[in-house]
Amino acid sequence: MTAPLPHPALGEYSTESRPTVAFVDLVALADNFKCLDDLIGTGREVLAVVKAEAYGHGAPEAAAAFVGAGARWLAVATVEEGEALIGGSAPGLLDEVRVLVMSGALPQLASRIASGGFEAVVWDMAQAEALAAAATSAGRLARVHVKIDSGMHRLGIPPGEAPDFFRRLGDMAGVEATGLMSHLAQADEEGGGEPTREQFAIVRALMSELEADGLLPPTIHTANSAGGISYPDAPGTLVRCGIALYGCPPQGEGGAPLR
């Protein structure tokens, strides 16, 4: 007795040498975006992370699904991923979408970041200066997001150095500081509530200082999927949703109706 095909489309492909086949449901991805957009509430947007080939699901296709569901922000890890995303997407699809390169604006990649029109993460002045020079040479304005280390102790500048960093960016031609970001260390871990809220307190204190000095950028993001869902009070205007978009809810959030 022959087992029924698991998906109608399977009949279109030969499985003689590759008997294992994965089908990506783009409708499910779009539904997940809408679900997360509802869960994080008003006042914050979902930034759809499509790094690592959209976690193996196909970056151009997944990006199209998220943009079709309402995404106005996408994020990749590297410049190469950003270039592949733009090159592989339908013409015009990303015209109104902002694409953030999260791995840091290495000086040797500044010209590619500027020419690609990507927004870039910076945490040292050498990155910013290289971007400013490349953007000016290309006749562009490079948007940058300053990353602070609020407690993950991996990348970013100390919060105390951020005000001066923003002042120096403000004096540079070719760059515009449009974002402030950080990364949560334990938002998805059991017992991570206290350290996560300590990170939030650090970010809020810095936001208040920057605002008082007229330096606060319009875009703030600290929360990943777990931070956005589990902490409705997470500071920021964006929530960087990654693995949850592909159907894997954060620990303790198994009730989220993701597919």
Image (cartoon, rainbow, N blue to C red):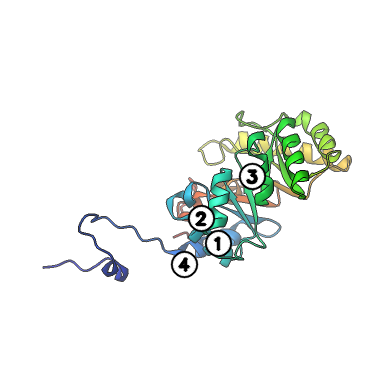
Residue at image position (46%, 67%) is: 27
Q: Which residue is mark 4?
A: 27
Marks 3 and 4 sit apart, C-alpha to C-alpha, by 33 Å
Residue at disc 1, secondary structure: helix
Q: Which residue is mark 2?
A: 245
Q: Which residue is mark 3?
A: 112
Residue at image position (53%, 36%) is: 191
Residue at disc 2, secondary structure: helix
**Circles 3 and 4 in contact, beta carbons < 8 Å:** no
**Between residues 233 and 213, which one lies in front from this camera angle?**
213
Residue at image position (55%, 61%) is: 66
Res. 212 image quadrant:
top right
Three-letter amino acid code at the position of disc 1: Phe
Q: Which residue is mark 1?
A: 66
Query: Which disc number belongs to residue 241?
Result: none
Three-letter amino acid code at the position of disc 2: Leu
> Can the viewer see residue 234 in this picture?
no
